[in-house]
Amino acid sequence: MPELPIRSFEPQDREAVIALHWELNRHEQTVSGDRALEREDAVACLADDEKQMASRGGVALVALIDGAVAGYLCCVLTNGGPFLRAELRRQAYVTTLVVGEPYRGRGVAAALLGEAERYARGQGVAALGVGVLAGNAGAERLYQRFGFAPHAVEMVKRLR
């Protein structure tokens, strides 16, 4: 397979990335049942990515297939708490990774993760993290194939 073009998110990608966020929210709704499903919620998701990158530093990337935005990744820099050894505190975290349904199974997610890892290594961070919803087995398999391993378990008790 030829190399997949990946570049930084640009203003002209906004509508395509909003559509990807919206697709991700609808998919995750089938897993978690708690996702906001309106287009304006997807707009807010992209705005949140931009806010996190502006305050923490990070990168937003798009993968292209035949000139169309096929996938999107946002990776931000984080600082772990004082409970971590000092040399392990600076980390990177993939806040968003989504591949459009027509482009899945074509290596888009792996290519975006590879670029995120290159970015993280270039920033000199100690680790690259990603979250996955419990029950999203496909995403778990992808991340494990890419070398991610479970590190912590976040638990939620619904109160309403």
Image (tube, rainbow, N blue to C red):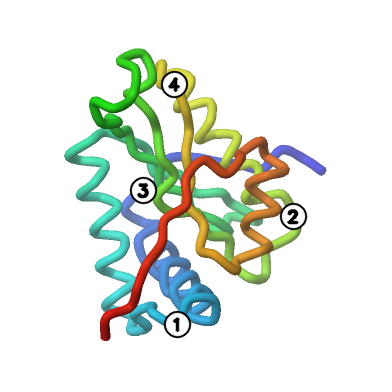
Residue at 25% over, 67% down:
44
Whether residue 61 is situated above or below residue 86 in the rendered picture: below
Neighbours of disc 3 within 10 Å: few (<14), some (14-19), many (20+): few
What residue would you read off at disc 2?
106
Q: Earlier in the sequence, mark 4 or mark 3?
A: 3
Q: Earlier in the sequence, mark 3 or mark 1?
A: 3
Left or right position of 152 against 156: right
Q: Earlier in the sequence, mark 1 or mark 2?
A: 1
How far apart, in angstroms, are the residues tagged by discs 4 and 1? 33 Å
How far apart, in angstroms, are the residues tagged by discs 2 and 3? 23 Å
Which circle, 3 or 1, is nearer the viewer? 1
Which circle, 1 or 2, is nearer the viewer? 1
Q: How many marks?
A: 4
Tell me whether circle 1 and circle 2 mark residues in contact (CB < 8 Å). no
Quadrant for the N terminus, please: top right
Residue type marked 3: Glu
Q: Looking at the image, can residue 12 be seen?
A: yes
Which circle, 2 or 4, is nearer the viewer? 4
Which circle, 2 or 3, is nearer the viewer? 2
How far apart, in angstroms, are the residues tagged by discs 2 and 4? 29 Å
What residue would you read off at disc 3?
10
Q: Secondary structure at mark 1?
A: loop
Q: Looking at the image, can residue 68 be seen?
A: no
- Label at residue 126: 4
Q: Give the x, y percent position of residue 22.
A: 42, 74
